Amino acid sequence: MNGDAWSLVLPHLTLPANPKSLDELVQSSIEQDNALVLYAFLRWKMARCTNIKEEQKLIGMILDWLKSFNYSERVEPKLPLLYASFFLLVFRQLEKGSQEVAHLYLAELADVLEQVAQVKGGFILSLSSLSLGRSGPRSLSPRARFLAIAVALSIRTNFSAQGEK
């Protein structure tokens, strides 16, 4: 197998044909922190993209989802799937020559992750303050918070390195 089990699932995936029902499915999945349904929808949409503008809309959708989640224990294990899809779509933007757009999306992802991970006082202070529990209804577990901080820090560090060259 090529490592992408979703290539086996997608041909059998049936989503509502009615756009209103599809929108309702997506909205319901966001409200219920059902990231796996959103990921399946995302993969389904990615397979149907015909141009770079459509892929930009998908990047925006992922960012919107990340801003909207309640970050329950149910959504956290699926976040890496959404992060990976985000980066795949951004890399496609770079391949098509849309560097400025890709940089804007990466900066926005870093902003979203910093907000979700509650980065205050810099990354080092945030990493040192990882607690053993959640501090609020929209807060991440220490594991998911660490991943969010690491991804945001990686993006920020690479932007700084690019600026120095």
Image (spheres, rainbow, N blue to C red):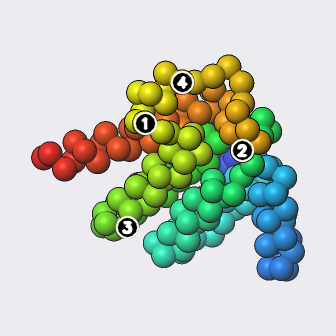
| Residue at the spot of label 1 | 121
> Depth check: 150 or 24 in front?
150
Q: Which label belongs to residue 105?
A: none
Question: Does 112 appear above or below 153?
Answer: below
Q: Residue at x 45, y 42 (%)?
A: 152
The quadrant of the rendering that contains the N terminus is: top right
Do the CB atoms of the residues marked 3 and 4 lie less than 8 Å apart?
Answer: no
Label 2 crowd bin: few (<14), some (14–19), many (20+), radius 10 Å: some
| Residue at the spot of label 2 | 138
Which of label 1 and label 2 is nearer to you? 1
> Distance of mark 3 from mark 1, alpha carbons?
28 Å
- Going by the numbered disc 4, the residue's amino acid type is Ser
Q: Residue at x 50, y 39 (%)?
A: 119
> Distance of mark 3 from mark 2, alpha carbons?
29 Å
> Distance of mark 3 from mark 4, alpha carbons?
33 Å
Q: How many marks?
A: 4
Please indicate whether residue 8 sits to the left or right of residue 122 in the image: right
Dot 3: element: helix
> Distance of mark 1 from mark 2, alpha carbons?
20 Å
| Residue at the spot of label 4 | 129
Residue at the far left: name it.
Answer: 165
- Going by the numbered disc 1, the residue's amino acid type is Gly
Label 3 crowd bin: few (<14), some (14–19), many (20+), radius 10 Å: some
| Residue at the spot of label 3 | 101
Dot 4: element: loop
Disc on the earlier residue, 3 or 1:
3
Residue 23: % across, % down: 79, 73
Disc on the earlier residue, 3 or 2:
3
